[in-house]
Image (tube, grey):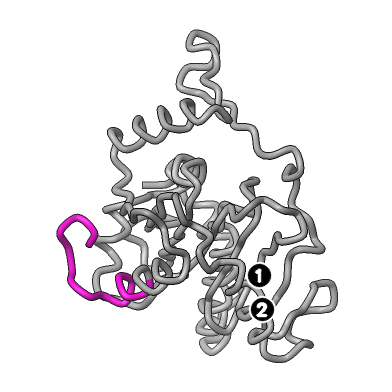
Amino acid sequence: MPFGGFVSTPLEQWVESVARMTRPDQTVWCDGSEEENTRIQQQLVREGHTLALNAKTYPNCFLHRSDPTDVARTEKITFICSREKENAGPTNNWMAPAEAKEKLGGLFTGSMKGRTMYVIPYILGPAASPQSRIGVELTDSAYVVASVRVMARMGKIALDRLGNSTDFVPGLHSLGDLNPDRRYVVHFPEEKLIWSIGSGYGGNALLGKKMLRAADRQLDGAANKAGWPSTCSSWVWNHRMEK
């Protein structure tokens, strides 16, 4: 349960369902605090794939190395899983939602055994703005926790705003076994849902930008009904660091 907060919220129910599928040893709700950030940074350095840089020339900076087979976002592993193939767009790979959930569901089953599942609530945009969107990423990567904190308002501030609402974009990520043949990034646009497995690299693992696309689809629907231009994603992204 997050920070002694709401009981049996839609978010908690989703987290519990994912935990049953991925079977992590423990679930940690990220609060975004300085203490948590320091603990995550120390953990990453201990694990050996992250190096603290020179404190004089690059204070509080780190170099994180992904697996040698996992160093770029690859178009062939990315799929739009819309109900109708034509809705995926002319330049995107398409997979039927049922097929994607069956295929990736098998990969996610037990994928977090022996690991920690982190629950990362975050806001892209000013915390009080009605146009800012809330995302929640579930991941077994401490690197993702550290990175989201740099990119967005993370933790309690997002959870407090969300409350009992269902208005968040869920993203599920697992490192899996890092096998390139079992690496997928899939978008379910009608469900505002994002799944990513088998990669710890950048945009494959950090689902915030993909969350913007999912949220933008919802916002643009409302904007188009009102006769407004489609500008939501660029507005949120450009203003994410403002107070």
Q: Is residue 161 left or right of residue 233?
A: left
Which residue ends up furthest to the left in the rendered image? 4
Label 2 residue SS: helix
Image quarter for residue 27? Answer: bottom left
The answer to whether any part of residue 54 appears in the image is: yes
- Write the start and end of the magenta stretch as one range: 1-14
Q: Is residue 163 left or right of residue 233?
A: left
User: Residue at 69% of width from left, 39% of height from top?
Assistant: 67
Badge 1: how crowded within 10 Å, few (<14), some, or many (20+)? many
Residue 186 marker: 1
Q: Whole-percent x and y of residue 83?
A: 67, 90
Badge 2: how crowded within 10 Å, few (<14), some, or many (20+)? many
Q: Is residue 194 left or right of residue 71?
A: left
For the N terminus, the quadrant is bottom left
Q: Whole-percent x and y of residue 89?
A: 78, 79
Q: Is residue 12 above or below residue 28?
A: below
- Whether label 1 touches label 2, CB < 8 Å: yes
For label 2, the residue is 100
Residue 8 marker: none
Q: Give the residue type at disc 1.
A: Val
Q: Give the residue type at disc 2.
A: Ala
Q: Is residue 72 magenta?
A: no
Q: Whole-percent x and y of residue 131?
A: 43, 67
Gap between marks 1 and 2 measured at Cα: 8 Å
Q: Whole-percent x and y of residue 116?
A: 40, 50
Q: Nearer the viewer, residue 137 or 210?
A: 137
User: Residue at 44% of width from left, 50% of height from top?
Assistant: 114
User: Residue at 58% of width from left, 74% of height from top?
Assistant: 105
Label 1 residue SS: strand
User: Residue at 54% of width from left, 55% of height from top?
Assistant: 237
Q: Nearer the viewer, residue 240 or 35?
A: 35
